[in-house]
Image (cartoon, rainbow, N blue to C red):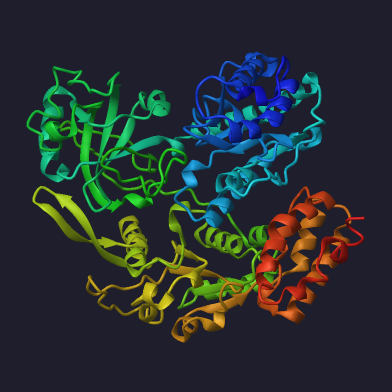
């Protein structure tokens, strides 16, 4: 049926892009997927043309990949340029990509992020994280906006497919070429060169950050019998100078070079508790999936008296590490390790069939005595503290000093817990994070953010029983939740009840969970911090006086008044409403033109919503806190963020939306 498709004599990037837009959607409906056809030929030609273009051909780290589906036609076909220093797959990292709209009316050249690592998250949280990363990246490539690239992330792939929506959210910068208006190859290549230059800036700055000592890559592996076998391994190290550790799964290709320089192997002894660490000085990986024998035959190692693996079940060893030091340490939760984004997720961190990819903790140097044990122990090197004062906090939050002082007084008092409540877009989470940084003087390890949701449980927040597989079968062991993990870290660090070293737990969107059930005995302990109480599984637990709890609540989802009364009594409630003063400071600081017109429109919108609904269903100022705010960007913010939210508010009374539109609310701004 290929004769029903438009013929192609495309020999330029412009021609190929146009022909794909004209051809692809017809091919999806008329051609079986797979084999050689006009679509595969078009993408092959496009790949070769992009590879041969000067911006790509002159850069040794770049590779070009394209896809129009795997097993079935893709809704959104694409062609990507990847920097091998950053990523080898469009599933993770940052890359440059041409995205073809489903309607076939245009193609975007974008600097985008991989979205697969967010598949396990709720879409709202995934979009929030993508937007946060995109904003951070834009700050380092502002020059792209000077050459016509859009920073609003407002691309529209004309598709309702979930993956397309994530592609849209992942965009850092974009330029749109509509069918019939695709520029010449010289312009296309110039645009490609500009976005690749920005890409190189991001990759180079990331590489520089990862080179810092605090960003050293480490691995996490499970070795349930480590407590019983550590002495044997130590004796082998003392006798032979090293020990060979075999693992039945492979090491990711993209980290082998970095890890070959030596790294720390953290060992999960079960129940997600890291109980040991080892120093790896050399590694070798099997060239095939069949595995390989011990490559250091002179060294004792796995499979020689070790009970860690059963070769008949797990197959051959595919990864080998040479260890020259190992020790048991004060246990800590594996979940407290910082993940390497794109390589591990909280769900995959502990996996019997893969390593967890994390960053090394800041600990004492590897100093080994004559017995092969660590002379320095596990005492943490003090985490650097920042000089964060009230002017810093005011500049970060744009809130007045009297409001901030009220929050700080609460959190430094005898009951240090508060709720930041307000409608969407009032910077509740941002303020909570800045308060936490201010109180802890920037100690990142002292702040824990927890996203509450309807299925969040007491077991996850406090403690619970979890199944653990051992030699004798499956048993259930008491597993600490977030609160007990943080208290354990405070105890290990020597900071328990020390007012000079506060720790903070941020409970984001707390009212989405069943709070009395999740909080359990904490409702008592928050009021009586000097007293202990038995938890469901543990005895005599006290809530440290220097453990601060900050909750955020979206009042459009659920009013604070609907929260359990006992819960409300234990928290001071600070309401963050739409604040034109905050927005005015931001717009003026970023030299946004006609800021007053923008402020007037927001006031009109919220006056209408407050009169017809209530103050809990108004619109927050942070929706408009964009350095590139312009009439075009306002249209996109209204279309993609505000209108869907307001339509939800007026679900049962759509007539109330009649006077609400960009033209009516901001007549002087969009004219």
Which residue is nearer to you in this view: 37 or 387?
37
Left or right, 443 with reference to 130 = left
Q: Where is residue 400 in the image (x, y as percent from the top left)?
A: 71, 69
Q: In which quarter of the image is residue 66?
A: top right
**Quarter of the figure that contains the C terminus:** bottom right
Q: Where is residue 384 in the image (x, y as percent from the top left)?
A: 48, 48
Q: Quadrant of residue 349?
A: top left
Which residue is nearer to you in this view: 407 or 665?
665
Left or right, 119 with reference to 471 = right
In the displayed structure, would residue 508 be above or below residue 20? below
Q: Position of residue 575 (x, y in %)?
A: 63, 75
Which residue is nearer to you in this view: 59 or 482?
59
The reply to whether residue 70 is in sight is yes
Q: Residue at x 28, y 46 (%)?
A: 378
In the displayed structure, would residue 137 be above or below residue 602? above
Left or right, 604 with reference to 640 = right
**Quarter of the figure that contains the N terminus:** top right
Q: Which residue is drawn at 29% across and 24% down?
A: 283
Q: Where is residue 259 in the image (x, y as percent from the top left)?
A: 37, 27
Q: Quadrant of residue 203?
A: top right
The reply to whether residue 622 is in sight is no
In the displayed structure, would residue 110 be above or below residue 38? below
Left or right, 491 with reference to 199 = left
Number of on-image labels: 0
């Amino acid at each position: 049926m290929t004769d029903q498709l438009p013929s192609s004599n495309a020999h330029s990037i412009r021609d190929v892009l146009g022909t794909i837009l004209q051809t692809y959607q017809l091919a999806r409906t008329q051609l079986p997927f797979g084999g050689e056809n006009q679509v595969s030929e078009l993408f092959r030609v496009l790949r070769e043309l992009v590879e041969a273009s000067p911006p790509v051909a002159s850069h040794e780290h770049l590779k070009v990949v394209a896809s129009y589906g795997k097993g079935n036609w893709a809704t959104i076909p694409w062609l990507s340029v990847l920097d091998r220093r950053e990523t080898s797959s469009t599933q993770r990292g940052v890359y440059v990509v041409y995205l073809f709209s489903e309607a076939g009316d245009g193609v975007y050249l974008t600097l985008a992020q991989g979205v697969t690592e967010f598949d396990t998250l709720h879409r709202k949280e995934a979009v929030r994280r993508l937007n946060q990363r995109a904003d951070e990246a834009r700050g380092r490539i502002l020059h792209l906006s000077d050459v016509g690239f859009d920073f609003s992330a407002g691309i529209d792939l004309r598709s309702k497919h979930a993956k397309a929506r994530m592609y849209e959210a992942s965009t850092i910068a974009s330029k749109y070429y509509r069918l019939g208006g695709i520029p010449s190859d010289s312009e296309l290549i110039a645009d490609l060169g500009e976005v690749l230059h920005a890409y190189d800036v991001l990759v180079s700055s990331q590489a520089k950050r990862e080179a810092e000592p605090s960003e050293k890559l480490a691995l996490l592996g499970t070795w349930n019998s480590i407590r019983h076998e550590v002495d044997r391994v130590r004796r082998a190290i003392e006798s032979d100078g090293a020990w060979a550790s075999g693992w039945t799964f492979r090491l990711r290709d993209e980290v082998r070079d970095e890890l070959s320089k030596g790294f720390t192997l953290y060992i999960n002894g079960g129940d997600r508790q890291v109980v040991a660490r080892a120093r790896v000085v050399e590694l070798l990986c099997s060239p095939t999936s069949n595995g390989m024998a011990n490559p250091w035959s002179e060294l004792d190692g796995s499979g020689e008296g070790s009970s860690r693996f059963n070769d008949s079940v797990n197959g051959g060893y595919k990864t080998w590490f040479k260890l020259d030091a190992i020790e048991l340490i004060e246990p800590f939760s594996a979940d407290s390790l910082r993940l390497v984004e794109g390589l591990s997720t909280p769900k995959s961190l502990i996996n019997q069939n893969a390593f967890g990819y994390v960053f090394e903790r800041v600990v004492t140097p590897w100093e080994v005595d004559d017995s092969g044990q660590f002379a320095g122990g596990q005492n943490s090197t003090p985490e650097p503290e920042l000089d964060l004062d009230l002017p810093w906090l005011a500049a970060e939050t744009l809130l007045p000093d009297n409001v901030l002082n009220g929050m700080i007084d609460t959190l430094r008092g005898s009951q240090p817990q508060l709720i930041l409540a307000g409608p969407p877009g009032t910077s509740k989470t941002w303020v909570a994070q800045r308060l936490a940084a201010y109180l802890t003087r920037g100690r990142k390890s002292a702040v824990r953010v927890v996203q509450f949701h309807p299925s969040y449980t007491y077991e996850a927040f406090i403690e619970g029983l979890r199944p653990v597989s051992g030699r004798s079968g499956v048993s259930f062991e008491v597993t600490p939740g977030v609160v007990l993990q943080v208290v354990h870290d405070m105890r290990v660090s020597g900071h328990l009840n020390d007012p000079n070293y506060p720790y903070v737990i941020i409970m984001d969107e707390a009212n989405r969970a069943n709070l009395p059930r999740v909080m359990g005995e904490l409702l008592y302990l928050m009021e009586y911090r000097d007293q202990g109480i038995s938890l469901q599984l543990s005895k005599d637990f006290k809530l440290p006086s220097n453990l601060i709890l900050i909750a955020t609540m979206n009042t459009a989802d659920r009013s604070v008044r609907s929260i359990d009364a006992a819960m409300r009594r234990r928290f001071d409630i600070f309401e963050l409403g739409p604040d034109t003063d905050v927005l005015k400071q931001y717009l003026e600081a970023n030299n946004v033109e006609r800021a007053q017109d923008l402020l007037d429109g927001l006031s009109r919108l919220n006056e209408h919503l407050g009169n017809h609904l209530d103050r809990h269903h108004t619109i927050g100022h942070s929706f408009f806190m964009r350095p590139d705010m312009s009439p075009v960007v306002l249209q996109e913010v209204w279309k993609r963020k505000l209108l869907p939210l307001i339509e939800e508010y007026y679900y049962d009374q759509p007539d109330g939306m009649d006077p609400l539109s960009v033209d009516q609310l901001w007549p002087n701004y969009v004219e």
